[in-house]
């Protein structure tokens, strides 16, 4: 008899929490989460871009690119692994493999090479990569955030699916590929990640060489996929505008 009030209160508390959470649709929770996540990423990449431009403006040089924004960009890129899970669990209609490929390529570039080899951090190609990434992401993440709540202006959607045409080759080919190529002598000299690769039949140097050989083909695959997305998104908008033309007046 003594335990009855506790059991009654616990039951009421449990059912109260159950009613509270069941009153919030999962779709709304996903919308709130996606808006928050993309807004945080948009803010982070905006700060990174400002840091890059401020450094160039104040020093009249791009040598301090990594010191200005490298750690922040590395953190933002690592955090973007969430987008792989977004596609995997289905809260966004995205194919997982292209997202995983892009995340893996970028993360390897910035975390495994640029962050670990000081000699390449002052290369112009690092600035080109970081600038292209930042410009791309200050467009992409705001578009995602506003699209999640259904209030994305058409011009931003157009910019999201058009800016990559120029920015993606600059960041991937002229930035990432050339930086990795210039990093090869330092990778070999430092025997980078030797402890991890000593048990494998190839070295990290050989791995990067093979990656560089495959990079143009992988890049082209992703580039064509993005063009397919562009046609799907912008073509669909054009069709909606066409079908939602002047309505016939009914007297």
Image (cartoon, helix red, strand yellow):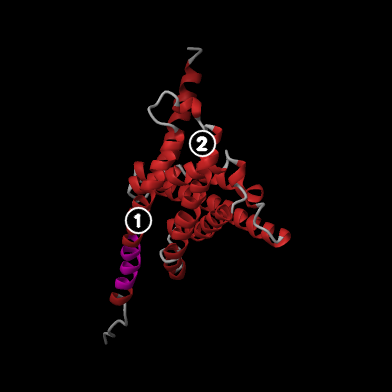
Separation (CA) of disc 1 from disc 2: 28 Å
Q: Image point 45% across, 54% down: which residue?
A: 172
**Numbered tag placed on residue 220 in the rendering:** 1
Residue 211 locus on image (x, y percent): 40, 43
The correct choice, above or below, for 137 with respect to 117 in the image is below
Mark seen at residue 175:
none
Residue 45 in percent (x, y) is at 57, 53
Q: 119 and 16: which one is in front?
A: 119
Question: Residue at label 2?
Answer: 188
Magenta part of the chain: 229-240
- CB under 8 Å between callouts 1 and 2? no
Mark 2 crowd level (few <14, some 14–19, many ≥20, 10 Å Cα)? some
User: Is 17 placed above or below 34 here?
Assistant: above
- Seen in the picture, residue 11 relative to 174 is either above or below; the reply is above
Does the magenta portion include 239?
yes
Q: Position of residue 122 (x, y in %)?
A: 62, 50
Q: Secondary structure at mark 2?
A: helix
Tell me the SS state at disc 1.
helix
């Amino acid at each position: 008899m003594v335990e009855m009030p506790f059991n009654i209160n616990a039951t009421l508390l449990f059912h109260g929490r159950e009613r509270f959470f069941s009153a919030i649709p999962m779709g709304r929770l996903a919308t709130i989460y996606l808006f928050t996540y993309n807004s945080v990423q948009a803010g982070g990449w905006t700060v990174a871009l400002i840091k890059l431009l401020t450094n160039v403006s104040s020093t009249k040089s791009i040598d301090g690119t990594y010191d200005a924004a490298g750690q922040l960009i590395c953190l933002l890129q690592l955090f973007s692994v969430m987008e792989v899970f977004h596609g995997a669990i289905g809260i966004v209609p995205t194919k997982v493999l292209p997202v995983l490929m892009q995340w893996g390529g970028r993360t390897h570039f910035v975390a495994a090479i640029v962050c670990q080899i000081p000699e390449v951090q002052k290369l112009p190609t690092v600035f080109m990569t970081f600038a292209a990434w930042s410009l791309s992401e200050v467009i992409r993440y705001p578009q995602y955030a506003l699209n999640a709540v259904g209030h994305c202006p058409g011009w931003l959607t157009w910019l999201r699916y058009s800016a990559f045409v120029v920015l993606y080759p600059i960041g991937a080919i002229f930035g990432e590929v050339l930086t990795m190529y210039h990093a090869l002598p330092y990778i070999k000299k430092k025997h980078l990640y030797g402890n991890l690769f000593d048990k494998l039949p190839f070295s990290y140097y050989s791995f990067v060489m093979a990656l560089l050989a495959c990079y143009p083909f992988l890049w082209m695959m992703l580039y064509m996929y993005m063009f397919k997305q562009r046609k799907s998104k912008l073509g669909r908008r054009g069709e909606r505008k066409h079908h939602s033309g002047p309505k016939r007046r009914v007297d």
